[in-house]
């Protein structure tokens, strides 16, 4: 029988969802690409400022429905930032302690946001220890390890129910090309690309799913080789996307194509989009934009018209000390001027 506390917690999360409007779909004019429309699903407008708000909501509802999340027991998550910010928000909403296990290098702004929502940050020097340390804390504190990288793909209802894919198609209904030619998505857990890919097949849409992957991530190689043991010695330098190991939530068979995106191209695209939009976006959005522009270039070469949809994952305000700091970029990413010239000549 469902306890009163679980009923209350689920109701609180559903009520929070009802108070939130859907995120905007922004149409971007591309003068160099006649007949090709680029749309950005702006996930930065969620209460916690990123795409991960959807994931955190789904993970909490999944954990509560499964009986894993219990009253007064802490929630533990392995996260480099945005997921932890969103989970801290929902943990506070239902009155639970929250601990984020994260690399010591995580952006300061994200740490501040986690603590703002009442969460604690538990730092590890070696990112490879995130999972083991999260499991240890959950064991020692009798809490629940949320494990976004395992459960992201199964916590979301991919058939519809206002998931991100359903929302995109509803918002595209009155556009010149209501069925997008391509949806471009970067992968962190793989949960969103799994949701979109499954939805496209379930609805029978002739839309291609292109997943873009940053440097030092194994998703692209796994998609090609299907070797689940693949690992990378270093982590992705684009926060929130790319993984050094194959995650259980990454479902390769629902992806039509993948593209490896150099980190310099991600940052150059991010800065280009800032000028186009008049506001800052995160680096993972830059990765998405680079992929979308490659699709637009291919469509133009082939004389095709249509719509491309991608995601604005989070705001750039979280990255003023990193991706928007020229010295930091020079030191950690390198010289991006050639990528800026390339994107400018599109």
Image (cartoon, rainbow, N blue to C red):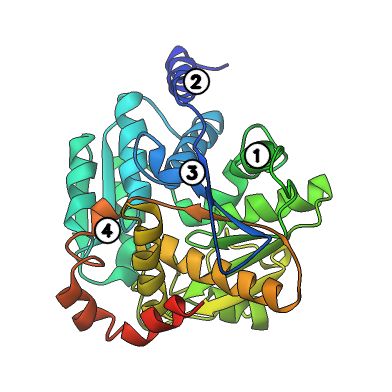
Q: SS of the residue at dot 3?
A: helix
Residue visible at 53% across and 81% down? 230
Compute the Cα span from label 3 to label 4. 18 Å
Q: Position of residue 231 (x, y in %)?
A: 47, 80
Mark found first going from the N terminus, 4 or 2: 2
Decide if residue 97 is on the left or right side of residue 16.
left
Residue placed under numbered mark 2 in the picture? 18
Quarter occupied by residue 157: top right
Mark toward the viewer: 2 or 1: 2
Decide if residue 152 is on the left or right side of residue 178.
left
* Residue 189: numbered disc: none
Instruction: Pick whichever, 299 or 1, lies toward us.
Output: 299
Quarter occupied by residue 280: bottom left
Residue visible at 36% across and 54% down? 135
Decide if residue 108 is on the left or right side of residue 155.
left
Mark found first going from the N terminus, 3 or 1: 3
Compute the Cα span from label 4 to label 2. 31 Å
Mark found first going from the N terminus, 3 or 2: 2
Tag 4–tag 1 contact (CB < 8 Å): no
- Residue 236 in sight in this render: no
| Relative height, residue 212 to residue 102 (above, below) | below
Q: Position of residue 209 (x, y in %)?
A: 68, 62
Callout 1: few (<14), some (14-19), or many (20+) C-alpha neighbours within 10 Å?
Answer: some
- Residue 158 in sight in this render: yes
Residue placed under numbered mark 4 in the picture? 102
Residue placed under numbered mark 1 in the picture? 157
Mark found first going from the N terminus, 3 or 4: 3
Callout 3: few (<14), some (14-19), or many (20+) C-alpha neighbours within 10 Å?
Answer: many
């Amino acid at each position: 029988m469902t306890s009163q506390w679980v009923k209350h917690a689920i109701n609180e999360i559903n009520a929070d969802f009802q108070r939130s409007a859907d995120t905007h779909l922004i149409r971007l004019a591309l003068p160099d690409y006649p007949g090709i429309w680029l749309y950005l699903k702006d996930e930065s407008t969620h209460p916690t400022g990123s795409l991960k708000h959807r994931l955190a909501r789904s993970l909490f509802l999944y954990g509560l429905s499964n009986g894993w999340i219990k009253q007064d027991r802490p929630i533990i998550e392995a996260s480099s930032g945005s997921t932890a910010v969103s989970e801290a928000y929902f943990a506070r909403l239902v009155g639970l302690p929250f601990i984020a296990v994260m690399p010591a290098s995580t952006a300061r702004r994200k740490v501040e946001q986690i603590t703002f929502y009442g969460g604690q940050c538990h730092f590890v020097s070696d990112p490879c220890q995130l999972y083991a340390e999260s499991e240890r804390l959950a064991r020692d504190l009798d809490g629940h390890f949320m494990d976004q990288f395992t459960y992201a793909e199964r916590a979301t209802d991919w058939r519809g129910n206002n998931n991100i894919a359903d929302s995109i198609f509803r918002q595209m209904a009155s556009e010149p090309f209501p069925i997008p030619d391509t949806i471009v998505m970067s992968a962190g857990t793989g949960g969103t690309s799994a949701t979109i890919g499954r939805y496209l097949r379930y609805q029978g849409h002739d839309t291609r799913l292109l997943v873009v992957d940053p440097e030092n991530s194994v998703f692209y190689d796994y998609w090609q080789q299907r070797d689940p043991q693949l690992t990378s010695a270093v982590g992705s330098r684009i926060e929130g996307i790319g993984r050094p190991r194959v995650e259980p939530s990454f479902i390769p068979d629902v992806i039509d194509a993948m593209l490896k995106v150099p980190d310099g191209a991600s940052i150059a695209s991010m800065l280009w989009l800032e000028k186009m939009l008049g506001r800052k976006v995160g680096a993972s959005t830059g990765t998405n934009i680079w992929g979308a522009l490659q699709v637009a270039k291919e469509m133009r070469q082939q004389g095709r018209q249509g719509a491309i949809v991608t995601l604005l994952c989070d705001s750039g305000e979280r990255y003023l000390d990193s991706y928007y700091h020229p010295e930091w970029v020079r030191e950690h990413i390198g010289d991006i001027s050639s990528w800026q010239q390339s994107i400018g000549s599109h």
